C-alpha cells in the first residue's frame, strides 16, 4: 500500500519548463489586462468627446395660433412637444389695436 501513495520526484528540466510556461502566460495576461484598461479609457474619452461636441442650446420660438372664438390653442411642434396656449378672439385684437392708435 505504501507504494501507491508514493509521489515520484519530477525531473528538474520538467519543472523549469513548467515555470517558463507559467511566466509566459502571466506576461500575456498582464499585457492583455493593460491593453483592456487602456482601451476602456480610450473608449470613454471618445464617448465624452462625442457627447460634448453637440451644442445644447435652448431656442424659443413664438408661434401664433388662432382658433375660432376664445379657447385653447394647442400646437404640436416638429419634435412632438405640445405647446398649450389661449387664443384671443379677433374682437379683442381689434380693441387692442384701437387703443394703441389713440
Image (tube, rainbow, N blue to C red):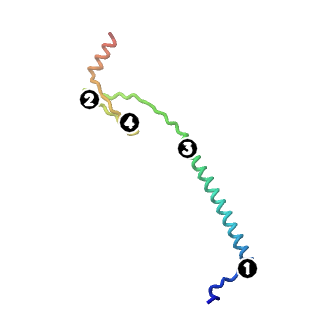
User: Which residue is at 27% across, 24% downward?
Assistant: 89
Give the residue pinned by disc 4. 77
If you read the primary sequence from the N terminus, does the residue marked by circle 3 or circle 4 appear first? Answer: 3
Q: Earlier in the sequence, mark 3 or mark 2?
A: 3
> Which is in the foreground here, disc 2 or disc 1?
1
For disc 1, the marked residue is: 11
Q: Secondary structure at mark 3?
A: helix
- Gap in Å between the C-alphas at discs 4 and 2? 19 Å
Q: CA distance from mark 3 to mark 4?
A: 27 Å
Q: Label 3 to label 2, Cα distance in Å?
A: 45 Å
Q: Is residue 33 above or below residue 92?
A: below
**How packed is label 4: few (under 14 Cα within 10 Å), some, or many (20 or more)?**
few
Res. 50 mark: 3
Within 10 Å of disc 3 (Cα), the crowding (few <14, some 14-19, many 20+) is few
Instruction: Measure the alpha-carbon separation of dots 3 and 1.
Output: 59 Å
Q: Secondary structure at mark 1?
A: loop
Q: Which of 57 and 76 lies nearest the eye of the viewer?
A: 57
Instruction: Tell me where residue 80 appears, x and y as whole percent.
Output: 38, 39
Pick whichever of labels 1 and 4 is earlier in the sequence: 1
Amino acid at each position: 500500500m505504501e507504494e501507491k501513495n508514493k509521489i515520484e520526484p519530477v525531473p528538474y528540466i520538467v519543472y523549469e519548463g513548467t515555470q517558463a510556461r507559467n511566466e509566459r502566460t502571466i506576461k500575456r495576461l498582464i499585457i492583455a489586462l493593460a491593453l483592456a484598461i487602456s482601451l476602456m479609457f480610450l473608449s470613454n474619452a471618445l464617448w465624452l468627446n462625442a457627447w460634448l461636441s453637440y451644442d445644447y442650446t435652448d431656442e424659443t420660438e413664438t408661434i401664433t395660433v388662432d382658433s375660432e372664438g376664445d379657447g385653447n390653442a394647442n400646437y404640436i411642434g416638429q419634435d412632438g412637444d405640445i405647446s398649450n396656449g389661449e387664443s384671443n378672439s379677433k374682437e379683442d385684437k381689434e380693441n387692442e389695436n384701437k387703443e394703441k392708435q389713440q
